[in-house]
Amino acid sequence: MWQLAQRSKELWHGLADREGPWEAVEWQRTGSLLLASNSEEAGKLEAQAECLKAAGVQAEMISASAVAKLEPSLSIPAEGGGMLVENDAQINGRNSAFLLLNICRVLAQDAGGEFDCKFGEGVTGLEMDGDGGVVGVTTSAGRRITATRAVVIAGGAWSSDFLAQQLKDNRWKGVIAPRMGQLLALTPPTDMPALTRGVMEMSYSKHYQEVGRKSAEGSPADESAPDITFTATTSASGELLLGSSRQFSGFESSAGLETTAAILKRAAEFMPSLSASAAAVSTLLAGGSPEEWSDGLVRTGPRPWAATGLPFVGPIPGHPRLYIAAGHEGSGLTLAPVTAEIIEGYISNGGTNVAGAEALAPEFLLK
Ligand SMILES: Cc1cc2nc3c(=O)[nH]c(=O)nc-3n(C[C@H](O)[C@H](O)[C@H](O)COP(=O)(O)OP(=O)(O)OC[C@H]3O[C@@H](n4cnc5c(N)ncnc54)[C@H](O)[C@@H]3O)c2cc1C
């Protein structure tokens, strides 16, 4: 995945540079810090830094006191440490999505065509010829759209059940599922030193190693209580963005205020200036108050979790002209451009030469 993430970063860089001002996507070369809270984690992080260096990423292990010097808002135990990746960058997801839409419009115009984006009109069915090849789709508005070259299923957490139903192929059932997540956006406390890097606790990386977290019934393993891992960064407009939760609760986030309280409590363990905010929301929760948290905004969304631990990107075997690009869990924004590059290769050239892409092919992942 590192190879793919690196390629995607290059592509994001090119897109933001060529198609619009960097401010449009709020590109910030903030660098990142992965935090270890004890000596065991620090040892593992050191090994991880060595692996990254071997893969060509500039990563450096630093002590807990060096972490505090770089980011005075953070406090971690002396036996912990941090892995610093100075070249990491961040973008604003929403703005970047609009940039991509605009690029699609411009590319279509340049080719003498038209880019038609139908918000609020869902695809309800796939139309196939006698050989299982896809020839079009039907929509909730009762339209039939002919596909002359390809249909790409990029419906996030909805993708695999849609395919199971349309292709009558149970191998797709439940292989991509919603994993709800909450992120908080708030004004940083006035006494908090500015946070300049993207930071996250080391255990965050476990979410990328959870291959096969499925029960015998084929649904994701129980995670009814939200799993909280600390992440923090400052947006270009100065908001403090705190994350995040992960929960298998269908498409509903079952514990709104509880999750908000848990995110703030965990964040305050790393950023003591947040203690008052964490205490305030806990008091609100303990009082059984119907009031919502009003010190910031809560953003919630379904991460498309894939049972394989890797997103599905490539042609769907047995169905010419049908492709999937879904299941990116918490990396869909990062991997969006490389995903498009892989799919474009399959559609235009019948294959991909993006290094590492073969591992994401449904033919390989569904075995
Ligand atoms: C709290 C949180 C923090 C995150 N942070 C990061 C981060 O820092 N970096 C990162 O890279 N990623 C992050 N992610 C993950 C990222 O948001 C996802 O990986 C990404 O949105 C997946 O993109 P997608 O297009 O595959 O799916 P989605 O964004 O879910 O989009 C799928 C779309 O398909 C539509 N759809 C579904 N069915 C149909 C149908 N039948 N017809 C038409 N349309 C349909 C849906 O309405 C939806 O709009 C985060 C997610 C959360 C929840």
Image (tube, grey):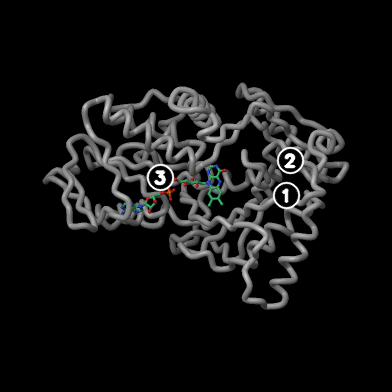
Q: Ligand 1: does it lie within 8 Å of the C-beta at label 3?
A: yes
Residue at 64% x, 51% y is 243
Q: Amino acid at mark 2?
A: Leu
**Label 1 close to label 2 by CB (< 8 Å):** yes
Within 10 Å of disc 2 (Cα), the crowding (few <14, some 14-19, many 20+) is: many
How many marks on residues?
3
Residue at 21% x, 50% y is 126
Label for residue 341?
Answer: none
Seen from the viewer's position, the closer of residues 239 and 34 is 239
Query: Vertically, is 137 above or below 287?
Result: above
Left or right: 257 with respect to 121? right
Q: Secondary structure at mark 3?
A: strand
Residue at 37% x, 35% y is 102
Q: Secondary structure at mark 2?
A: loop
Q: Earlier in the sequence, mark 1 or mark 3?
A: 1
**Label 1 close to label 3 by CB (< 8 Å):** no
Label for residue 326?
Answer: 3
Mark 1 or 2: in front is: 1
Left or right: 346 with respect to 227? left
Residue at 70% x, 41% y is 199
| Residue at the disc numbered 2 | 195
Q: Position of residue 230 (x, y in %)?
A: 69, 50
